[in-house]
């Protein structure tokens, strides 16, 4: 008998009807002869609503209490789903992250899993019960406090449990049929990708494609746990995220050079204007940003104008951290001797991703030509071995995605993508 771990996202368990539908699916998987462990997210937009509530009573909610509050969302889903399954005549037991043995560090709001000791889950499934686990949460090894893994963290709970239980597959259910060549909400001709490598999925997720939690993919890659991304609203086969070898074995035809187009509207751009062109200046700027615990993404430094010997340095960062970065940098103004700081949060990032590009020349040229034909101006560029990203004006993100999608022939003739639920919040 194989172990199957299934994770259902917030839109799949948004209301009583959704929970009953999920319960039927879980029972079918059990009846097919599997041991089943289910990880649930909070119902619908519960997590956002709880955050709003916290902000109404406190401008800066204490991290420990915020985690305590947010984990309640997943505890509601787990208990209600267990009831719905029992109502179908099958035994189900719900467990908090802590009861399920998800041990983390003590970083509230972004805790990392350091160990999984799923003794109670193993016992439950060995006794023939279906185990339901609250996603996105654990318990700190040192403080014994309840922690959360960061937004979208239930995916990571599911993969971590799948690895610890030596499951055959980790199935991640959401409101779309799998991973698409672009976000179907802005590219109606997006096609479902049948198989994709961990590396490509990581790039897509890191570049803003809201497909899977980044850390869940890293975890799956480290332990080679296949992930099947699919919809809880349909029976269709979804997308398999597997190791690169298993993708290429599968593709009998000439492999697609580009697997997908990702976009991200959550970034902002800071430009440090008039930086003296001498050693140590960039180091001082980025040290200040790093000390403020801010993760930056792209960096561009202009060639300094010969006359002034001053240069501009631009970088992108998450919008939510823009204010902190600007404050940290303004303190450096005199020491570093730059002229001014500019902040722009109406930017977006568009990326093409594909393992095939490392051996195909002319990919960037084709991408940039497509953008130019669509009248999209490129503000910044960055690349990795399997990705090319550009920063553009936020108002041009959709045009850029559509242009890139068409330039690499990613579109299907029929409309394939169905978005079944969710508010996209
Ligand atoms: N409920 C949490 C969130 O909305 C965790 C998750 O959905 O995975 O971020
Ligand atoms: Mg959610």
Image: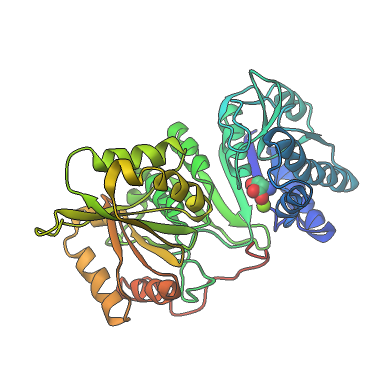
Judge by depth and name the residue closer to the eye, 321 or 96. Answer: 321
Could you say where residue 50 lies in the image, as x and y percent from the top left?
A: 76, 50
Q: How many marks?
A: 0
Quick one: quadrant of the C terminus? bottom right
Specify the farthest residue to the top. 142
Judge by depth and name the residue closer to the eye, 69 or 251. Answer: 69
The answer to which quarter of the image holds residue 233 is: bottom right
In the displayed structure, would residue 114 be above or below residue 272?
Answer: above
Residue 350 visible to an observer of this rendering: yes
Judge by depth and name the residue closer to the eye, 358 or 288. Answer: 288
In the displayed structure, would residue 101 be above or below residue 361?
Answer: above
For this view, does 109 lie left or right of residue 311?
right
Could you say where residue 382 lies in the image, as x and y percent from the top left?
A: 28, 55
Specify the farthest residue to the left. 306
Quick one: quadrant of the N terminus? top right
For this view, does 161 lie left or right of residue 98?
left
The answer to which quarter of the image holds residue 185 is: bottom right
Could you say where residue 324 lies in the image, as x and y percent from the top left?
A: 50, 47
- Scheme of image coloration: rainbow
Residue at left 37%, top 70%?
410
In the displayed structure, would residue 381 be above or below residue 72?
Answer: below
Residue at left 59%, top 71%?
418
Residue at left 33%, top 44%?
334
Could you say where residue 80 lies in the image, as x and y percent from the top left?
A: 85, 46
Residue 8 visible to an observer of this rendering: no
């Amino acid at each position: 008998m194989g172990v199957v771990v299934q994770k259902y996202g917030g839109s799949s368990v948004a209301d009583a009807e959704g929970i009953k539908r999920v319960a039927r699916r879980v029972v079918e998987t059990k009846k097919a002869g599997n041991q089943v462990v289910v990880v649930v997210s909070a119902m619908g937009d519960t997590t956002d609503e709880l955050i709003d509530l916290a902000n109404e009573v406190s401008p800066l909610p204490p991290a420990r209490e915020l985690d305590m509050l947010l984990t309640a969302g997943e505890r509601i889903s787990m208990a209600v789903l267990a009831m719905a399954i029992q109502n179908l005549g099958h035994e189900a037991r719900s467990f908090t992250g802590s009861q399920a043995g998800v041990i983390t560090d003590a970083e509230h709001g972004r805790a990392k899993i350091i160990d999984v000791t799923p003794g109670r889950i193993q016992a439950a499934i060995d006794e023939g019960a279906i185990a339901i686990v609250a996603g996105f949460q654990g318990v700190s090894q040192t403080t014994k406090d309840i922690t959360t893994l960061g937004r979208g963290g239930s995916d990571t709970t599911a993969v971590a449990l799948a690895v610890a239980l030596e499951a055959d597959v980790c199935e991640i259910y959401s409101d779309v049929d799998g991973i698409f060549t672009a976000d179907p909400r802005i590219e109606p001709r997006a096609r479902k990708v049948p198989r994709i490598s961990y590396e490509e999925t990581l790039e897509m997720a890191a570049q803003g494609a809201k497909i899977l939690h980044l850390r869940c993919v890293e975890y799956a890659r480290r332990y080679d746990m296949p992930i099947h991304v699919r919809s809880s609203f349909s029976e269709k086969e979804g997308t398999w995220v597997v190791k690169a070898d298993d993708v290429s074995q599968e593709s009998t035809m000439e492999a697609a050079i580009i697997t997908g187009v990702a976009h991200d509207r959550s970034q902002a751009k800071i430009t440090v204007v008039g930086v003296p062109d001498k050693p140590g200046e960039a180091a001082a700027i980025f040290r200040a940003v790093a000390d403020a615990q801010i993760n930056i993404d792209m960096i561009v430094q202009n060639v300094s104008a010969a006359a002034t010997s001053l240069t501009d340095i631009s970088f992108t960062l998450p919008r939510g951290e823009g204010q902190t970065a600007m404050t940290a940098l303004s303190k450096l103004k005199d020491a570093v001797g730059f002229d001014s700081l500019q902040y722009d949060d109406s930017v977006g990032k568009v990326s093409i991703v594909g393992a095939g590009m490392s051996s195909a020349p002319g990919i960037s040229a084709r991408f940039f030509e497509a953008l130019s034909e669509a009248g999209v101006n490129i503000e910044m560029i960055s690349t990795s071995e399997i990705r090319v990203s550009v920063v553009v004006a936020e108002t041009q993100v959709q045009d850029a995605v559509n242009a890139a999608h068409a330039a690499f022939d990613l579109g299907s003739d029929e409309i394939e993508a169905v978005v079944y639920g969710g508010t996209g919040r």
